[in-house]
Amino acid sequence: MDLLAQPLADLRSQVSAVVRAASAERAFERGAEAELAGQVAVIAEVGRLIEALLIDAVGEVARRSENAVRDERMTSHFGCRDVTELLQTLTRQESRSVARLQRAAKAVRPDISVMTGELLEAPFPSVRDAMTDGVIGVDGILAITAPLQQAASRVSAVARADAADIVVAEARGEGPDGAPPACAELLRIHAQTWSLALDQDGAEPRERVAERKRSLALGAPTANGVPVRGTLLPEVAAQLQTIFDAHLAPTVAFDDPFAVDEDGELPALPAVDERTRAQKQHDAFAAALGVAAASGLLPTIGGHAPTLVVSVDAEDLAAGTGYAHAQGCDQPVSIGVARHLACSGVIQRVTSRPDGRIVAIGTEERVFNRHQRRAIALRDGGCIIPGCGVPAGWCEIHHVTEHARGGPTHTDNGVLLCWYHHRFLDRIGWQIRMNAGVPEVQAPPWHGTDRRWRAVTTSRVRLKKRLLRT
């Protein structure tokens, strides 16, 4: 007998009716701000109560799928390989959401005595009570229990449950400081604080585990790229995040920020960067690898700094057709990639006969030295594309006139570009020219009708001088 079929059917009908009425009557738009705030709070509470039902149901699905005999598991009865696959099918949620449901269920699911069938106490009774009261949902449950469970091997279950009681009081708005009910983010902070206070061994045990589990591996190359997987130590991840933040903070301005054109209008705004955050972080990581390889501080390979070697036929490079090949990369790369790498690196020309015999080896040429780089960095400040913000230390130097077309390796022909704008300069449409040794940019056609050339910099010295002249 299905004890919940009719109540759930009634609940679905009622919720469906409310959703349709709210949409048809434009209830949210017509309500005052105080009414709208109250409506959001009530809807969220109803959602947490429904989550409580779902969490308990997920817990029972997991329990019925724990049988040692595979054929007797619930997952096997429904033709699924595991609980996650079954729940994805039933809930129509992605794997990450389903995994969170399972973790929440494990934290609040009461065990059942194998001897008597009696329902035992949940690992965190107060958390379960708050769930059934609609005080917390999946986010709140995990915010409270996850930090405390991390110390399970070093802190007693009683002490962890007592700490959870105090954090749950904060969730109910009944904490010692009398603060309003805390959101999941604040609950996580409280739980983490209690976990650290109860864990007398400090961070060392966790660090030893992290050290054992640290890893970074490159997957098998695919047509779309090479996947990366692994687990970083917290401090390594923090360092990488610092590098990301340095790249993602927009601080670039035009050299003449207060200039107006003949019509009295301000210059066009910098272009909007359409990359996703993940793409930006990839590009920041690529820039960091380039800086590290060029630093001279890494171990050498064959007596030289780690160098990415790219081979390309000279005729293909001149014509812009065909493919290039990077050492250690199974997939061929485009001529555009070869141009990008050649622009910021050195070129050594090797002449060979059709049968492959090498008949001449040229010397390495056309790389900006450290003195030129410092001068260009002082002039440009960072990547010269408006709206970018990558500092000089993370930039590459671009030959405005290609070396292959006679462009000199001189400060009057070199500008700072970040890895992304250097790699995709031809595609994004910004034009660069040198005017008496000063770089100027022209916005692409899609950026607006203003086709003016503008001097650009983020050099504080140059910007200050310009402001003093106005």
Image (spheres, rainbow, N blue to C red):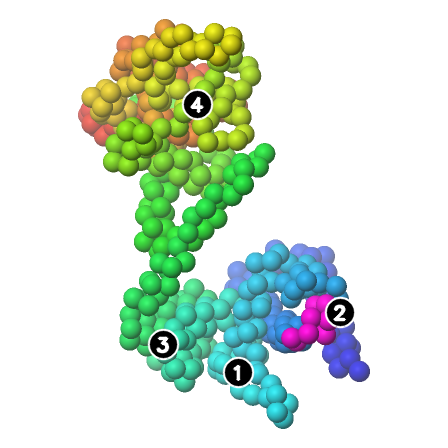
Q: Which residues are magenta?
A: 67-76
Do labels 1 and 3 touch, CB within 8 Å?
no
Q: Amino acid at mark 1?
A: Ala
Distance, label 2 to label 1, CA atoms, is 28 Å
Q: Which residue in the structure is indicated by mark 3? A: 154
Asked whether residue 14 appears in the rendered view, the answer is no
**Mark before the other along the chain sequence, 1 or 4:** 1
x then y, percent, for residue 270: 42, 29
Using a 10 Å C-alpha cutoff, classify the residue at mark 3 as few (fewer than 14 neighbours), some (14 to 19) or many (20 or more).
some
Q: Which residue in the structure is indicated by mark 2? A: 77
Q: Nearer the viewer, residue 37 or 119?
A: 119
Using a 10 Å C-alpha cutoff, classify the residue at mark 2 as few (fewer than 14 neighbours), some (14 to 19) or many (20 or more).
few
Q: Secondary structure at mark 2?
A: helix
- Of circles 1 and 3, which is in front? 3
Distance, label 2 to label 3, CA atoms, is 39 Å
x then y, percent, for residue 201: 29, 73
- Of circles 2 and 4, which is in front? 4
x then y, percent, for residue 242: 33, 46
**Mark before the other along the chain sequence, 2 or 4:** 2
Distance, label 1 to label 3, CA atoms, is 20 Å
Which quadrant does the C terminus fall into? top left
Q: Secondary structure at mark 1?
A: loop
Q: Main secondary structure of the magenta part?
A: helix
Q: Secondary structure at mark 3?
A: loop
Q: Amino acid at mark 2?
A: His
Q: Which residue in the structure is indicated by mark 4? A: 310
Above/below status of 467 relative to 261: below
Q: Residue at x 44, y 23 (%)?
A: 310
Q: Amino acid at mark 3?
A: Arg
Distance, label 2 to label 4, CA atoms, is 55 Å
Q: Which residue in the structure is indicated by mark 1? A: 122
Q: Nearer the viewer, residue 162 or 40?
A: 162
